[in-house]
Image (tube, helix red, strand yellow):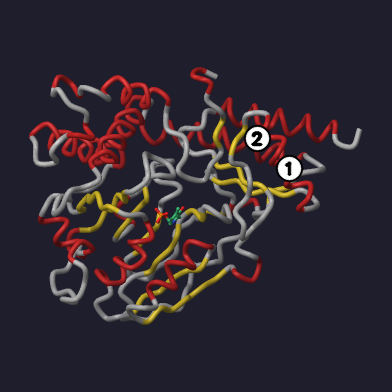
C-alpha cells in the first residue's frame, strides 16, 4: 500500500479517503494562498466562512437535504447529543426509544435524566443480534419523538425498514452509517452523526434538523452550547467551532460527490460487505453474529468457537497489517469495520488472510 499504510478496520476514528488526506497534506502549511494553515485561521475570517458554507452546500447536495431542514456542525461527539436531543426536543417530556444495541442503550440512559422514556421495542433478549419488528408499536399520542440508532456500531445490526412512528417524528443516530447510502431526509425529524466513523476526524457531530422542531422555549438552565436555536442563529459558530473537522469533512463531501454521490458509494459498500459476509457464511471457523437480514454494511462482528482462538486471530491479523479487528469488549470476538473509506481490496485482502489462517490452522 502507498505510504506504508495498513488496512485499518477500526470502528472509529477510522480510515479517511487517501485522496482527501493528500489534499489536506498539500494545503497544510498554506491554505490556498491565505499564508496559514486552516488550524491557524480565525473562524470569523472570510476564507474560513467559505469553507463552512461550501461544506454545508456540498452536504445538502449529497443528501438532497430539503430547505426546511437546518444543518448544524456541533462540537462534541454523538454522546453529547444523547443529552441535547431530549433537552431540545422533549416538549411533553416523553419519548419513545427503540433499544437495538449499545448505542441506543446509552441514549436511553441519558434521556431518562430529562423525561419519560418508553422503550417500545428491544432486541436485548438475543444480545442485540436483530432489529425488532416496529411496524405496529404502542406509541403514546403525546410522545415527542421516536428515537433509533440506525446502525449499531458495536453489535453490527442495521435497520432495513424504518419504524412506523404513527405520525411522530423520527430521530436517528446515523453515526456509523452517515453518507454510506442514499437517505430520504424527509422521513426524519432529525438525523445526526458523530463524524469520526464515516467522514472525518473526531470531535464533531453533523445534525440535520427540521426547522420547525427547533424550539426557543427551553429550560433556562440548559447549557447554551447545547441549544439548537443558538447554534442555528449563529451559523454553528456561537463559539469557536471545530474548524479542522469542518474543513476535513467538507473535503470528504466533495470527494463523495466526485465518485458519483451516495448511490455510487452504496454500491461499493454493498459489494465490499458481501466479500466478508460470503466468506463468513462459507467458513467453518468464523461465523457472523447477526441475523442475516439485519447485517450492517459498515460493522461486521464475527466469532470463532473460543475467545482464545479469537485472540489468536486478532494477533495474527495485526501482524499481517490488518489493524483494529478486535471486537468490542461487550460482544467479544472480532469486528471488521468497513466504512466508506475502506477500499474493496482491503476486504478482499482480509478475507484472503482469514481463509489461509483457517486452512493452515492446527497443521
Ligand atoms: C461512536 C458512536 C457514538 C458515540 O460517539 P462519540 O463521538 O464517541 O460520542 C454514538 N452512536 C453511535 C452509533 C456510534 O457509533
Comparing 31 with 112, the one in front is 31
On the image, which quarter does residue 13 sit in? top left
* Dot 2 beta carbon under 8 Å from ligand 1: no
What residue is rendered at 42% in x and 29% in y?
A: 17
Q: Which residue is mark 2?
A: 318
Q: Position of residue 271 (x, y in %)?
A: 56, 33
Q: Residue farthest to the right? A: 363
Are there few (<14), some (14-19), or many (20+) residues within 10 Å of tag 2? some
Q: Which mark is residue 281?
A: 1
Q: Is residue 104 left or right of residue 273?
A: left
Q: Is residue 200 left or right of residue 316?
A: left
Q: Position of residue 155 (x, y in %)?
A: 58, 56
What residue is rendered at 60% in x and 46% in y?
A: 300
Q: State the SS at label 2.
A: helix
Q: Which mark is residue 297?
A: none
Q: Is residue 280 above or below residue 140?
A: above
Determine the quadrant in which ligand 1 lies: bottom left
Query: Which image quarter holds the N terminus?
Result: top right
What residue is rendered at 73% in x and 42% in y?
A: 281
The answer for how far apart the CA atoms under marks 1 and 2 are is: 23 Å
Amino acid at each position: 500500500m502507498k505510504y506504508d499504510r495498513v488496512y485499518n478496520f477500526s470502528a472509529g476514528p477510522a480510515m479517511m479517503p487517501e485522496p482527501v488526506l493528500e489534499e489536506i497534506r498539500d494545503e497544510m502549511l498554506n491554505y490556498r494562498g491565505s499564508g496559514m494553515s486552516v488550524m491557524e485561521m480565525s473562524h470569523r475570517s472570510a476564507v474560513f466562512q467559505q469553507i463552512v458554507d461550501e461544506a454545508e452546500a456540498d452536504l445538502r447536495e449529497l443528501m438532497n437535504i430539503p430547505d426546511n431542514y437546518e444543518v448544524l456542525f456541533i462540537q462534541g461527539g454523538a454522546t453529547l447529543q444523547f443529552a441535547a436531543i431530549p433537552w431540545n426536543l422533549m416538549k411533553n417530556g416523553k419519548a419513545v426509544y427503540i433499544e437495538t444495541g449499545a448505542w441506543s442503550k446509552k441514549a436511553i440512559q441519558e434521556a431518562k435524566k430529562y423525561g419519560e422514556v418508553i422503550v417500545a421495542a428491544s432486541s436485548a433478549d438475543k444480545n442485540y443480534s436483530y432489529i425488532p419488528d416496529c411496524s405496529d408499536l404502542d406509541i403514546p399520542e403525546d410522545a415527542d419523538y421516536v428515537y433509533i440508532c440506525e446502525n449499531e456500531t458495536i453489535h453490527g445490526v442495521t435497520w432495513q425498514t424504518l419504524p412506523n412512528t404513527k405520525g411522530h417524528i423520527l430521530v436517528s443516530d446515523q453515526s456509523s452509517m452517515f453518507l454510506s447510502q442514499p437517505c430520504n431526509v424527509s422521513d426524519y425529524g432529525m438525523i445526526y452523526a458523530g463524524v469520526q466513523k464515516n467522514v472525518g476526524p473526531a470531535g464533531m457531530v453533523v445534525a440535520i434538523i427540521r426547522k420547525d422542531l427547533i424550539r426557543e422555549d427551553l429550560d433556562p438552565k440548559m447549557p447554551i452550547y447545547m441549544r439548537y436555536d443558538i447554534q442555528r442563529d449563529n451559523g454553528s459558530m456561537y463559539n469557536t467551532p471545530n474548524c479542522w473537522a469542518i474543513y476535513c469533512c467538507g473535503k470528504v463531501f466533495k470527494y463523495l460527490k466526485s465518485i458519483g454521490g451516495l448511490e455510487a458509494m452504496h454500491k461499493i459498500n454493498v459489494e465490499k460487505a458481501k466479500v466478508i459476509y460470503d466468506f463468513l457464511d462459507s467458513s467453518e471457523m468464523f461465523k457472523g453474529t447477526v441475523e442475516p437480514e439485519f447485517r450492517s454494511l459498515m460493522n461486521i462482528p464475527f466469532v470463532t468457537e473460543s475467545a482464545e482462538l479469537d485472540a489468536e486471530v486478532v494477533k495474527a491479523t495485526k501482524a499481517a497489517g490488518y489493524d483494529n479487528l478486535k471486537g468490542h469488549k461487550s460482544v467479544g470476538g472480532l469486528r471488521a469495520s468497513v466504512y466508506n473509506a475502506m477500499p474493496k481490496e482491503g476486504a478482499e485482502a482480509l478475507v484472503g488472510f482469514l481463509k489461509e489462517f483457517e486452512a493452515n490452522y492446527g497443521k
